[in-house]
Amino acid sequence: MDVNGFEMKEDLYYTKLHTWARIEDDVAVVGLDPIGIALAGKVSFVRVKKVGMMAEQEKPLGTMEAGKGVVKLPAPVSGEIIEVNPILAGRELNSLNSDPYGEGWVVKVRMSNPDEVNNLLTGSEMLAWAEAEAAKVPQ
């Protein structure tokens, strides 16, 4: 769905700090939403925990450097990090900025508590939040 020019996927779960999760069985594919990227500025570097490390819901998975400084990336769910997007190893993060729901995903987490998705934003709650956040992006 389009929210003031930003694509927000209705089948994803969002945090209020601009990370999202796509649930695939017991794995959450995690990324940054386009509103958060616009608010932070173009992402130039991302550092995340390594494969095998644990993510904890609402705690930082890592950080990203963007046009407006360094920003913490909160984990939408808890569990073991089972994969880190290989694009993060380089400095070419174009797909993270331009395709955050596709090639620009950040990590995959095997969820330790799938019920945590109930703490995330979806549906009309996500839409209201996204509209308020999109209004903060400078035109």
Image (cartoon, rainbow, N blue to C red):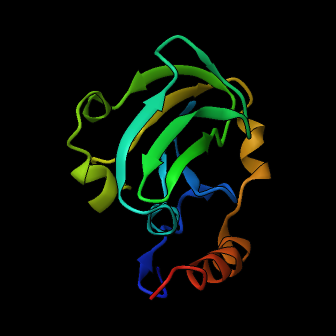
Q: Is residue 9 visible?
A: yes
Q: Residue at x 72, y 34 (%)?
A: 59
Task: Name above or below for residue 126 compared with residue 58.
Answer: below
Tell me: 19 left or right of 107.
right
Task: Name above or below for residue 49 compared with residue 2.
Answer: above
Q: Position of residue 95 (x, y in %)?
A: 25, 52
- Image quarter for residue 92? top left
Q: Is residue 25 visible?
A: no
- Image quarter for residue 128? bottom right
Q: Residue at x 45, y 30 (%)?
A: 47
Specify the quadrant that holds the C terminus: bottom left
Tell me: 82 left or right of 44.
right
Q: Position of residue 10 (x, y in %)?
A: 53, 69
Q: Position of residue 87 (x, y in %)?
A: 25, 35
Task: Name above or below for residue 18 compared with residue 113.
Answer: below
Tell me: 57 left or right of 101.
right
Q: Position of residue 54 (x, y in %)?
A: 63, 18
